[in-house]
Amino acid sequence: MTSKHLTVAIVDDQPLMRETSRTMVGMFGYDIHSEATNGEDFLDQLAKGQSLPDICLLDISMPVKDGFETAMELRAHYPEIRILAYSLGASPDQIQKIKQCGAHGFLPKEGNPGRWAEAFDQVRAV
């Protein structure tokens, strides 16, 4: 990815976590592309011709369409989007599964700002 202002889509069903994510994304100098409350919502936005984000910050556990299903659809239809999955208290099996579904990285929601920065750097480098 180039040094242009990268755009990030936040897909999370928790309003407080979306707010926290907006703050963190802004701290790193990225622009917010869009927000969605679940995977189906986000995929609908993309299908309507919305421009693509550079990175999708994707919660694993959401109603309607979870992060696993969403990651697989993103990989199949929008492979240029880098997926950074995140979750609170994810098990090692869940982390492995989301990566197998197409995520380029994983971030624990409870991570400190330094951990968030590392995770975004890793996903950008993919």
Image: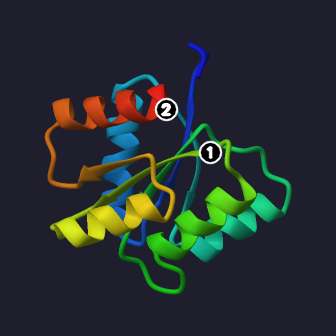
Residue 107 % position (x, y)? 27, 49
User: Which residue does the image show at 34% across and 39% down from the upper left?
Assistant: 23
Q: Badge 2 local density, few (<14 within 10 Å), some, or many (20+)?
A: few
Which of 105/59 is in front? Answer: 105
Looking at the image, residue 72 lies above or below residue 51: below
Q: Residue furthest top?
A: 3
Residue 8 visible in the shown view: yes
What amino acid is at disc 2?
A: Val
The reply to whether residue 90 is visible in this rendering is no
Q: Which residue is mark 1?
A: 81
Q: Amino acid at mark 1?
A: Ile
Residue at 56 percent of width and 69 percent of height: 70
Q: Position of residue 16 (x, y in %)?
A: 30, 62
Give above or below for 63 relative to 94.
Answer: below
Q: Nearer the viewer, residue 105 or 110?
A: 105
The residue shown at (79%, 51%) is 50
Compute the Cα span from label 2 to label 1.
11 Å
**Helix, strand or loop for disc 2:** loop
